[in-house]
Amino acid sequence: MSLRRDYAEGDAQTFAPSIAPPTAFAPAAPAQPATIASSLGIVNSVPAKPFVPFAPQYPTPQSVGSVVDDAFAGYYGYNVEPTGLFGKKKKDAKVEGEKKPGFLAKAKAKADSVVRKAASGAKAIAKGATDMVSGLSRFDYKLYSESFTAMLAVAKKANGTDLSDKNNYKAFEGDSTYKAVLKIAKAQEAKMTRTESQTKNVKGRESKVISRKIAGRNAACLGFAQVEESGESKERYGDVIFPPAAAAGIPTLVTLTENDTNGVAGMLPITGLVVEAIDVDALAKGGDDKIAISMAEVPQVKLQASQESLTADEFEFQWSLCVHGLHVDGDKGLHAGPKILVPTGKTNDVSAYGIATDNGVERALSHAIKGEKLDLLLLWTSFKLVQGAKGLANAGLDAKQKAAAQELFGSLDGMGTQNSFSEDVDADEFDELNAATIM
């Protein structure tokens, strides 16, 4: 009997599989991933290994102090002071229980010192770069921003005490428009004198200082002017009178003697310049409560005369800053010179600068040529200071100094804010809103 026949015997029906086909309602078997073992029909009876997080084979090393130092410090029961060679006591003996800095601490301290020095050097370089970019490389200056806003500038010193003539300006040099004025400036400077001093030492005698008057101006002198004693200037800048403030980069007001003169009676040497906002209330006004601006003719540069009167508000739109000189007398008293007024939008035109007088505002160049209230050198150094200081408004200063620079020099480009509204709310949080511009 064949297998085929045996397979069909005993049953007349056709063979049916022993496993019933899945119905539509039977749940689907979960899909199992195909593996080599499942393909070969091998059942993997080994349970899966649980996840074990990584752990280092060895513990993290912990820093410890020097065994010798710890022993001397009393950690191991020895209360003795460390000694140097041959039993000599070390200079810096440790206090009992005080842990001496290890090698890493010393290395860190040394590295921090290097970083501090580098930062200090970088700060000095940054200041020097700011001075060069802004045009203040010939001045030592300081911005005041606490109880008042102002800038004090003096002739630049190399190391806090030494002055160099190379940092001095020559009045009206470098502009062909002012050739005639330059001749007058040279004539004024030719009359200037200074004091030459030296210490004389003779063996067996007491040392003494000898001095004499010689031609030429002192390197600390920024010009000459008629001055008046100023208690406010003494209160504000009295602490920088030489020598207490002697240091590189710090403005130091220098006292000059009676030998430092320009040959004109009543004109005294100026060794400091102050830049501040104009106090309009302090300017002389006429019967109509307006400020008269009388610009005299200057034939040397073909300037015509002009005259106008402005209200206080109108004046402040056209004039914003003033510069005045400081003179230090022999008793360390401070005296202020006349106010040189800076025209907004015309800071590059020295002929447009004014000077405060009993009659209002007059042309500073006209007075300087005559040498009445100030000389051409003082007008020129003040003009150059303002030119350089304008760049401070956009320089890399700290927050307070930057605010002071913006307050003084931020509007010197003559750009006014038009169509604005303000005074709606006085609270500080609405300052930005009050200053908004309506387009």
Image (spheres, rainbow, N blue to C red):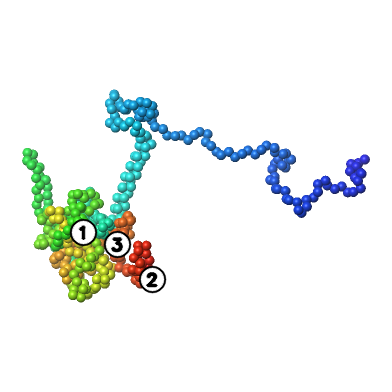
Q: Label 2's element?
A: loop
Closer to the chain start, of discs 2 and 1, is: 1
Closer to us: 414 or 14? 14
Q: Quadrant of residue 264?
A: bottom left
User: Compared to 161, does 62 lie above or below?
Assistant: above
Q: Which residue is mark 3?
A: 407
Which residue was labeled with disc 2?
Answer: 438
Q: Is residue 377 left or right of residue 436?
A: left
Q: In the drawing, does residue 377 fall left or right of residue 24?
A: left
Residue 214 in view (yes/no): no
Q: Is residue 51 left or right of residue 325?
A: right
Residue found at the very far top of the displayed protein: 86
Residue beneath disc 1: 273
> Is label 1 in contact with label 3 (beta carbons under 8 Å)?
no
Q: Are marks 2 and 3 in contact (CB under 8 Å)?
A: no
Horizontal and vertical percent position of residue 428: 35, 62
Tell me the tag on residue 146.
none
Q: Residue at left 75%, top 51%?
A: 26
